[in-house]
Image (spheres, grey):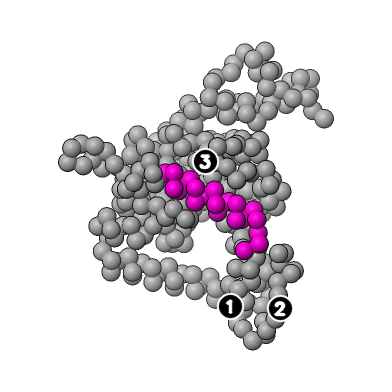
Amino acid sequence: MSLEQIPNNNLNNISPQEEFLRSKEDIEKTDFDLIKLRHLTSLLAEKQKQENPELPIDTETARLNMDDYVENKVFSKEEVEGIKETVKELEAKFLDKIDSSNIHEKIQQEINGEKVELLTAIVLYKFLKDKFIITRSSRYDDIDNGTDTIIFNKTTGQIVCTLDESGVLIGQYADRKKLKILEKNEKGGTRLKFGLILTKDSEGTPHIQGGSVANIPIFDILMDSNEVNKHLLEVQNNLDHVSNFEHTLFRYFAQSIDFQAKQMQDPELKIPSNIKQLAQEFRSEIERLFPNILYHDDIIEQRKKGILKPEFYTNSIKISKPEERDAFREKLK
């Protein structure tokens, strides 16, 4: 169902906020790309929960589940109930900004934004699942701390970074978001009320549990929602299959992280050393896992021999010799 096909029955009798919620729900029920992405996200959450039974993750949404932090005695029930009330208040402030003139625009922004967040988690999971845990942030940290995706190193027991994704690639909004992320890193990174830590039980066995965490580098990942929507059909309803689009998207993620991690090293930005170090370590780990991911091909070579296929960049083996690299080329059409 498109936005233009929203039923208009009795809409004059309800508030813009109610119309927004009803219409958004109607569209979500028939948006097959969104349904597929939600299904895949649920699958990756279930798989990670099976591997790490104490992981406080909601297996339906892949968000860190605030209620699990009560069960694990990180917070009291009263504390979490109070935080949930704060979330409702923040959500109400968003709804207050909706009027009859911007309902369709806000619905589209919300749905496109969710697709970008879900797709990010899915692609990161497919490529990084052996080394990292990929979750969506709790609803509270999403709204209040501006974090969408959390990347946790299984070995070191650290959240190496958080991501703030957007479906807007260029323009004033994108520029403001970049500046906001930079300022947040200068102030010591982001914090998570509902984060992850690695602890050991009485026998010394490590296990993951919930906990508040601070001083985490945050990266912004900007995408064009319209361009993303064109390729969502290529994402199969299967976590074991990786499409060319997903190979390309992961490379874009790596390039964005590489650029921002290097940018953080600029002494004029005055970013704390621990933030710079964590960001650089994550950037280096991506390149260690995928040694060709940041390779820049020669334009003349592309014209003569063809462009490199997406899977070249995500190959786990370093490919240095030109003749070996040429095996991954395809002629330009």
Q: How many marks?
A: 3
Q: Residue at x 36, y 55 (%)?
A: 194
Which quadrant of the structure image shows residue 197? top left
Q: How far is the residue under mark 1 from the one under mark 3?
A: 35 Å
Which circle's residue, 3 or 2, is located before the other in the chain? 2
Q: As shown in the figure, which amino acid type bears the numbered disc 3? A: Leu
Magenta-tinted stretch:
29-48
Foreground residue among 280 and 94:
94
Q: Say left or right for 181 vs 155.
A: right
- Tag 2: residue type? Asn
**Front position among marks 3 and 2:** 2
How far apart marks 2 and 1 lie (CA) works out to 13 Å
Q: Is residue 94 left or right of residue 281?
A: right
**Which type of secondary structure does the marked residue at label 2 adopt?**
loop
Q: Residue at x 48, y 36 (%)?
A: 128
Question: Mark 1 is on which residue type?
Answer: Glu
Considering the numbered disc 3 on the image, is that residue within a helix, a strand or a loop? helix
Determine the secondary structure under disc 1: helix
Query: Circle 2 sits on which residue?
Result: 8
Image location of residue 90, percent across then percent down = 46, 69
Q: Is residue 2 above or below residue 247?
A: below
38 within the magenta span: yes
The residue shown at (53%, 24%) is 316
**Which dot, 2 or 1, sits closer to the camera?**
2
Instruction: Pick whichever of labels 2 and 1 is earlier in the sequence.
Output: 2
Tell me the residue that label 1 is attached to: 18
Question: Which image quadrant is residue 137 in?
Answer: bottom left
Q: Which residue is mark 3?
A: 124
Measured as percent of width and height from the top left, residue 184 is found at 45, 52
Q: Position of residue 28 (x, y in %)?
A: 62, 63
Residue at the far right in the pictured view: 333
